[in-house]
Image (spheres, rainbow, N blue to C red):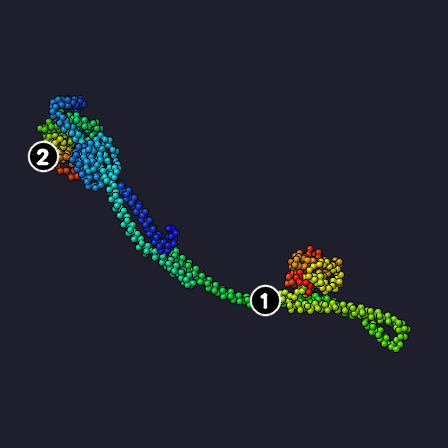
Amino acid sequence: MSFCCDFKPRPWRRLCDALSVMVLLVAPLRMPAQNVEEMREYRKKAECLLSFTRFIEWPEDKLAPADEPFFIGVYGVDRISPLLLEALQGRSIKGRSVIIRHLLKRRDLRSCHVLFISRSEQDRLRPILRAVRKRNILTVGECDNFLLQGGVLSFVSVGNAVRFRLNPEAAAREELAISSRLQQLALPGGLGLITSPQERLPAPKGTSQTTGR
Amino acid sequence: MKSRVRHFPIQRKLRLVVLGTCTAALCVASAVLFALQFYFFQRDFRRDLVVVAEIVAANSTAALSFNHAEAAQENLASLKAKPQITGAALVFADGRPLAHMGRVTIPSPGEAAPSLGFHEDSDDFVYIHPITSEGEPLGALYLQADYAREASKLHKLYASILIAVLGVSFFVAVLVSWRLERLILGPIQNLAETARRIARENDYSVRASKVADDEVGSFTESFNSMLDRIETRDTMLLHEIAERRRAEEELQHAQTELIDASRQAGMAEVATGVLHNVGNVLNSVNVSATLLAERLDESRAANLARAAAMLRDHNGQLGDFLANDPKGRLLPAYIADLSADLENERREARTEIDLLTRNVEHIKDIVSMQQTYARVSGFTESLTAAALVEDALRLNLDSFMRRHIIVERNFAPVPPVEVDKHKALQILINILRNAEHAMRDADDPDQRLNIRIRQHDDHTVAIDLTDTGVGIPPENLTRIFSHGFTTRKDGHGFGLHSAALAALQMGGRLTAHSDGIGRGATFSLEIPISESPIS
């Protein structure tokens, strides 16, 4: 695989961080009118993203060794990283320290535990998702066709609220154990079809996968 | 109350005991059950709330995490299945409510959150359960449950159950006790009935029937064996009564015989007394007779006959004979001497015969006294004590003189006494004879008898006869008046005995005193003073 790459050395990471900070600083200046609304949306998405980790179990191989940090990657235009940091408030995930990294290169993708692919990558979803296939990565997107392309979770905006859809096949493929409680909250019609929230049927208890949370 | 119960019949007591015990046991059991039920109810109520809260809380972590009010509401709605839960709410860690259902009190934002766990809010329980995810607090679940209503429902249910159980148990207890009390009461009543029958009919042959081998059974056995014994004793008693009656009859018979015997014995005693006294007097008679015979033997009456023959031989020449014959010349003087001698002899004989006659008279009196002996009070006469003493002395004078016993009289002037003369004489003669014997046995040749008459008290005169004889040892003093007691070889122990008896019969008393052996003795005869003048 051409995207395949391992952990980047530290100087590179610092550069990434610096860039993301620059983006953060530049963004409000660029879109002042949309900004507030977008901030609210991404704050919710950041919170949800962190919450997903509570209800999803990764295979043991993916989490070994124990002292490795929990890696959250952001691909594409990054509007979420600072909000993630804000929502995280120094907490740990799965008992590990958390690293949030804006990925510019596909090579870095595979080392993530969670990969958020932003809206900007809507057209390049297929190759990106293919690159991280079967790497036990929770892929989270915000495009309508994200699940159809093989993503695991996809944010959906329902009015002001941020909801999500789930692709159970993809979760199974990635060997991610998704808590039934999360499944219950997922909007139905997971594979890209937009349905109204009213039509959402609660998944019957106990039938879904259980997690060892 | 207690004393009233004590007088109840056993049947009622037994029923009281059974029912009381049953009721007490039931009450205790019910109370314990009640308490346990309430304890368990409360515990289970809390436990139930906790369990429900745990489930709802676990199901609500995602809803809280994703701020999903709809899902939260749905979770809370499932609590409607629990009627005791009146309200519930899901609250974020910062106090913002996510969803609520029914009536529930949650702190308004900014207000301090109450502590987790149970809170009692008047009639309600409020349970606050924490909701965490991976050790991080997400929020809390508030559950409000109406404990009072549930509890009162339970109270009512248990109260009615208790009343029903008590009622049924009481009824069953009555039935069972009714059946069982016969088991205990039957034998007791049987016993009581038997006892009553025995008391009523006095029939000790009745037996109580033994029903069982219990305490009452053994009691029945004891009762029956007691009855056996009573019956046996009854029979024995009847037998004994008959025996006793027969013995009584025998005794009466024996008594009659004894009376006869004693009468005969009395007569014998009297006869002995009579013979004794007669013997005493006969002694004097004998002495007098002997003296008289001696006198007659020595009489010179024969010499008179010789003188008479001499005179007859000189018939015709009597003057000559008397004048010339030497014998004839002595004859007149001799005759005069002889006649004087004869005269003297006659006088002495006369005296002796008088004494003899008196003695014979006394014997006659003694014998006649035997015929009046049985009389309680013999013929009494008023006499002077001195005369009595003189009479007695006279009867014994001879023997006294022969023993050279000096008699001293020390007579004080006293009132006349009222006595049966012969009894009194008999007593005095007895004492005198005893004194004579005592002095005869003593070695001292100088013997004297002191007779003293004095007034003893207002009603009696005492005659004290003090001798200088052998005396009486102290151990004998108490016995000398007993029948059969004597210290003399030829004595029969009757004299003093009859003398003492006679003194008593006269209303007097005979006492003895002695300082010991060789120191003489004093006999005192007390006799009553006469009320009437001397007859």
Q: What chain is tagged by disc 1? A: B
Q: Residues within 10 Å of mark 1 (few under 14, many from 20)?
A: few
Q: Can you tell which mark lies on residue A193? A: 2
Q: Quadrant of residue B479?
A: bottom right
Q: Position of residue B361 (x, y in %)?
A: 70, 68
Q: Is residue B216 visible?
A: yes
Depth check, front residue: A23 or B12: B12
Q: Quadrant of residue A46?
A: top left
Q: Quadrant of residue A37?
A: top left
Depth check, front residue: A206 or B13: B13
Q: Which residue is mark 1?
A: B259
Q: Position of residue B327 (x, y in %)?
A: 88, 72
Mark 1 residue type: Ile
B183 on left or right of B61: right
Mark 1 secondary-structure assignment:
helix
Q: Position of residue B342 (x, y in %)?
A: 81, 70
Mark 2 secondary-structure assignment:
loop
Q: Can you tell which mark lies on residue B197? A: none
Q: Residue furthest bottom?
A: B316
Residue at coordinates 16% horizontally, 34% vertically from top-left? B69
Q: Residue furthest left?
A: A123
Q: Is residue B496 visible?
A: no
User: In the rendered view of the protein, which quadrant contains the C terminus of chain B?
Assistant: bottom right
Residue at coordinates 21% horizontally, 29% vertically from top-left? A92
| Residue B24 to residue B54: above or below | below
A170 on left or right of B444: left
